[in-house]
Amino acid sequence: LKSRFPSVTILALQDNIGFGRACNIGVAASKGSFIFFLNPDAVAPVQAIRVLIGFFEKHPRAGIVGGRLVDPSGLPLQSIGDRSTFISLVLEKPIEWVAQRINPFGMLRRALGRYFAKFRMPSGAEPVPWVSGAALCCRRQAWDETGGFDEKFFLYYEDVDLCLRAAKVGWEVWHVPEAVISHQSGASFAGNLKHQKHIYYANQRYFFQKYQGSVVAFFFSLAQKLYCWRQSWKSPLL
């Protein structure tokens, strides 16, 4: 990589210290007006990046923008989301299972998009509570005012947290579907689904504790255990 792009600064970390913490180190060594985070299992065409940067230039209060994520076959992935609540997460799992198997582009998905942002597929740019960190572009000023990623999130939910904190200090978060980015979700774990879920659930609990308190986090932890127990019985909905 260094030989092909000699102007690029490479920071080789010795250990896996977590997505947020590693990104914070990278940003501290950078100087640009905009910061683009891209997962190692995602591919962003140059045109997609240009679209995101161009959006910033036309919208001075936009602090964070993200594009439309698709898998390598072109099927839609979750690019945006609502502010998570206990009830919404409990309902989304079985609904998502049904939606994916009926038609990922069909009427059911469009109907669900009225109530759940994760199913929505906007045709134009719109403000949203949060965009996925798989391909997230942030204005430097917004980054500095929020303090970057919360390093207590090892992986997952650090993007949601960053967007919510940016909005709290007055910045806008936008989804720009014109910028299409391919993402092979989960490829970084090389098929180790058990390890991936362990990290995901741990960060999910911390998110609920941070935003809704210890009591809600406790009951959410019980719900996670019930969900895992049902998975062990191979429930068709989980």
Image (tube, rainbow, N blue to C red):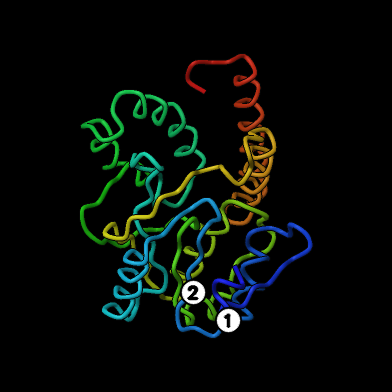
Q: Name the quarter where the N terminus is drawn.
A: bottom right
Q: Farthest residue in the front direction? A: 3
* Camera-nearest residue between 92 and 214: 92
Q: Is residue 99 above or below residue 1?
A: above
| x then y, percent, for residue 215 | 65, 44
| x then y, percent, for residue 91 | 44, 32
| x then y, percent, for residue 42 | 48, 53
Q: Is residue 36 above or below residue 16?
A: below
Q: Residue at x 39, y 29 (%)?
A: 95
Q: Is residue 24 above or below residue 78?
A: below
Q: Quadrant of residue 20?
A: bottom right
Q: Are marks 2 and 1 in contact (CB under 8 Å)?
A: yes
Q: Quadrant of residue 176?
A: bottom left
Find numbered disc 1 in the image and state the secondary structure of the residue it sits on: loop
Find numbered disc 2 in the image and state the secondary structure of the residue it sits on: strand
Badge 2 density bin: few <14, some 14–19, many ≥20, Cα 10 Å: some
Q: Residue at x 34, y 42 (%)?
A: 76
- Which residue is labeled 1 in the image? 30
Q: Is residue 130 above or below residue 225?
A: below
Q: Farthest residue in the right direction? A: 14
- Which residue is labeled 2 in the image? 35
Q: How many angstroms separate mark 2 from mark 1 (CA)?
A: 8 Å
Q: Residue at x 33, y 76 (%)?
A: 56
Q: Residue at x 67, y 44 (%)?
A: 199
User: Which dot marks residue 91?
Assistant: none
* Camera-nearest residue between 28 and 153: 28
Badge 1 density bin: few <14, some 14–19, many ≥20, Cα 10 Å: few
User: Who comes first in sequence, dot 2 or dot 1?
Assistant: 1
**Does residue 130 appear to the left or right of 30 in the view shown?**
left
Name which residue type carries label 1: Ser
Name which residue type carries label 2: Ile
* Camera-nearest residue between 37 and 234: 37
